[in-house]
């Protein structure tokens, strides 16, 4: 009995002294707003200009290649911000006097689930998705999953490859490109 208690105490102390990475930040409302990034397909509509209207894919540098104006940066922008930027570039080019542009996402990049879940991998995004639904789509939790240790790695608009780590719950909204990590419980 004493050996078991001593072993338990030793294991507890070892777990408490383990060096963990910096705690993830909490999700803010601004981070839940969808921002365009590489791999997204967007539909750009230039009103009364059918030759300029079409679907375009955001390239690896976060740019759209548009007729008349060339490469236009959209990475990290909302649909509205991208539309304003394209409008400004069209006005500056001199081809259109008063362009009216709208941008809407046609196909969003996938999200990923890994860690203590049954079937990790890449999954297609759909609007309104929560962490709970994403985990369910990945086959559910394993018996060792720590449902209180869920982290989302999310790309930021601070340049290519920049990301932030967010602490999440099962109700946290998932965005395209998110990487959901479910931690392992130790006891």
Image: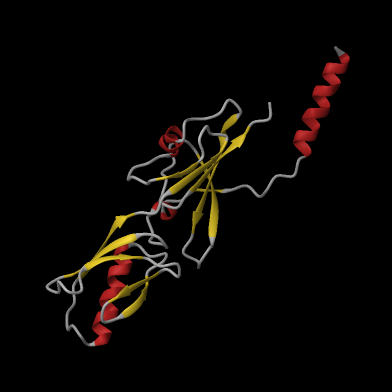
Q: Is 51 on the left-hand or right-hand side of 186?
A: left
- Residue found 28% across the figure and 69% down from its top: 83
- Rendered view: 70 above or below 82: below
Q: Position of residue 22 (x, y in %)?
A: 66, 50
User: Which corner quadrant holds the C terminus?
Assistant: top right
Q: Position of residue 97 (x, y in %)?
A: 17, 84
What number of labels is visible? 0
User: Which corner quadrant holds the N terminus?
Assistant: top right
Outermost residue, right side: 2
Q: Quadrant of residue 37?
A: bottom left
- Rendered view: 63 above or below 39: below
- Residue found 24% across the figure and 83% down from its top: 91
- Residue found 40% across the figure and 67% down from its top: 59
Outermost residue, bottom side: 94
Q: Is 165 on the left-hand or right-hand side of 125?
A: right
Q: Position of residue 170 (x, y in %)?
A: 46, 35
């Amino acid at each position: 009995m004493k050996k078991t208690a001593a072993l338990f105490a030793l294991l507890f102390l070892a777990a408490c002294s383990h060096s963990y990475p910096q705690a993830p930040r909490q999700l803010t409302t601004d981070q839940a707003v969808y921002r365009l990034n590489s791999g997204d397909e967007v539909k750009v509509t230039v009103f009364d200009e059918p030759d300029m209207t079409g679907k375009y894919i955001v390239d690896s540098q976060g740019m759209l290649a548009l007729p008349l104006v060339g490469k236009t940066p959209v990475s990290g922008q909302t649909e509205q911000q991208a539309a304003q930027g394209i409008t400004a570039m069209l006005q500056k080019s001199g081809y259109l006097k008063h362009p009216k542009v709208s941008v809407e996402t046609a196909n969003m990049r996938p999200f990923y689930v890994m860690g203590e879940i049954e079937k990790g991998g890449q999954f297609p995004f759909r609007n309104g998705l929560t962490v709970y639904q994403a985990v369910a789509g990945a086959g559910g939790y394993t018996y060792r999953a720590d449902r209180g240790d869920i982290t989302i790695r999310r790309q930021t608009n601070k340049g290519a490859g920049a990301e932030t780590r967010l602490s999440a719950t099962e109700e946290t909204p998932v965005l395209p490109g998110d990487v959901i990590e479910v931690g392992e419980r130790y006891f």
